[in-house]
């Protein structure tokens, strides 16, 4: 198993996990909805220590009250987790446009002041080499970049040019969390 890997036995999990990431300290961070809740809200976090001799789970309730079923997540520089987009239609007020940053060093989740311009379901988030995060897809034509210092920025093609040779996407905008 140490050279080839293998599947282990099933383990109980304290929530319906939507996304998992390995934190810089080797623990596993998941977010989702507590078991038996009946409504997918998606921003309850759980840390699991795979080396723990006990259950190893620390669950952090949805203190930000943000809906993120169908959301995307990516680790930021420094190990915080950015969660953006998603919607289960269980809440109102465009809460799926909000972003949550989970700080693994202190087990806290905060909602950023910067919000997405449009709802996104099943989008993709990646971290760029310069530390910003890029979000694409999810039903919105814009691509966005995100930075913890500034928030979301919509990226557009230079005037008189197109970002693609596909005429259907000629007016596509780009965005990143700066």
Image (cartoon, grey):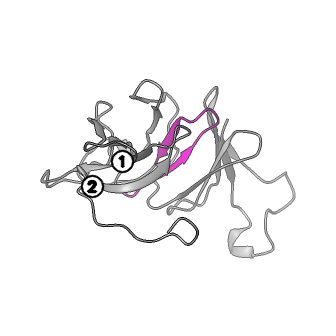
What segment is highlighted magenta in the picture? Answer: 70-84
Residue where numbered disc 1 is placed: 31
The residue shown at (51%, 41%) is: 82
Along the line of sight, which residue is nearer the eye, 96 or 15?
Answer: 15
- Magenta-colored stretch includes residue 31: no
**Percent of width and height locating residue 16:** 26, 56
- Compared to 154, does 123 lie above or below? below
Circle 1 or circle 2, nearest the eye: 1
- Confirm or deny contact between disc 1 and disc 2 (CB under 8 A): no
What residue is drawn where x is 18% and y is 53%? Answer: 39
87 over 95 or under it: above or below: below
Q: What secondary structure is found at the residue carrying circle 2? A: loop
* Quadrant in which the C terminus appears: top right
Q: Is residue 71 visible?
A: no
Position in image of residue 152 (x %, y %): 60, 38
Q: Height in image: 90 above or below 114?
A: below
x, y (%) of residue 25? 52, 37
Mark positioned earlier in the residue sequence (1 or 2): 1
SS of the residue at dot 1? strand
Residue at x-position 71% and y-position 62%: 171
Q: Please give the label number shown on residue 89.
A: 2
Q: Position of residue 109 (x, y in %)?
A: 40, 30
Residue 98 in sight in this render: yes
Residue neighbourhood size for the residue with mark 1, other residues' Cα within 10 Å, grouped as few (<14), some (14–19), many (≥20): many
| Mark 2 burial class by Cα count in 10 Å: few <14, some 14-19, many 20+ | some
Q: CA distance from mark 1 to mark 2?
A: 18 Å
Q: Among all residues in the image, which is located at the extreme right?
A: 160
Please give left or right for residue 30 compared with residue 77 in the image: left
Q: Is residue 73 magenta?
A: yes
């Amino acid at each position: 198993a140490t050279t080839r890997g293998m599947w282990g036995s099933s383990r109980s999990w304290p929530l319906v996990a939507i996304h998992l990431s390995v934190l810089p300290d080797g623990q596993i961070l998941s977010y989702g909805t507590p078991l038996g809740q009946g409504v997918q809200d998606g921003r309850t976090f759980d840390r699991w220590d795979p080396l723990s001799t006990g259950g190893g789970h620390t669950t952090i309730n949805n203190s930000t009250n943000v809906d993120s079923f169908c959301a995307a997540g990516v680790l930021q520089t420094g190990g915080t987790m950015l969660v953006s987009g998603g919607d289960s239609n269980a809440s109102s007020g465009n809460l799926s446009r909000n972003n949550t940053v989970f700080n693994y060093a202190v087990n806290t989740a905060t909602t950023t002041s910067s919000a997405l311009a449009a709802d996104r379901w099943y989008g993709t988030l990646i971290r760029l080499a310069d530390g910003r995060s890029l979000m694409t897809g999810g039903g919105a034509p814009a691509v966005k970049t995100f930075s913890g210092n500034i928030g979301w920025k919509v990226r557009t093609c230079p005037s008189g040019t197109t970002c693609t040779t596909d005429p259907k996407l000629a007016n596509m905008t780009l965005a990143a969390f700066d």
